[in-house]
Amino acid sequence: MEKSGRVLIPVAIRRQLGLKEGESDLLLHFDEQPVRITTRAQAVARIQAAAAKYAKPGESWSEELIADRRREVEAERV
């Protein structure tokens, strides 16, 4: 670790983690041992894969959320 607090990740570890040189949008997970480092894209992909097992064919959670919000707005107008 440098005096500035910047941490250098060796190239072999970056390759193993799928990180690209200069990538700055990293997430550190301290809830596990050892500490896990991922990119935001990797975290989103992991969450999407975990949620996919609960989705039904043809179901769109984002469309349901938008519809719910529209109903709430409409209810507030009354």
Image (cartoon, rainbow, N blue to C red):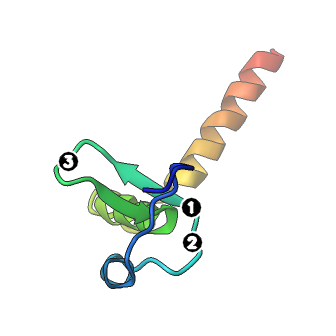
| Residue under label 1 | 25
| Residue under label 3 | 32
Q: Nearer the viewer, residue 43 or 55?
A: 43
* Residue 49 in view (yes/no): yes
Q: Nearer the viewer, residue 46 or 31?
A: 31
Residue 2 position in % (x across, y down):
49, 56
Neighbour tally class for label 1: few under 14, some 14-19, many 20 plus, Cα within 10 Å: few
Residue 6 position in % (x across, y down):
52, 56
| Residue type for callout 2 | Glu
**Residue placed furthest toward the front:** 3
Say above or below: 58 vs 27. below
Q: Quadrant of the C terminus?
A: top right
Q: Residue at x 29, y 58 (%)?
A: 36
- As helix, strand or loop, the secondary structure at mark 3 comes to loop
* Label drawn at residue 46: none
* Label drawn at residue 23: 2
* Sequence order check, earlier mark of 2 and 3: 2
Neighbour tally class for label 2: few under 14, some 14-19, many 20 plus, Cα within 10 Å: few
- As helix, strand or loop, the secondary structure at mark 1 comes to loop
- As helix, strand or loop, the secondary structure at mark 2 comes to loop
| Residue type for callout 3 | Glu
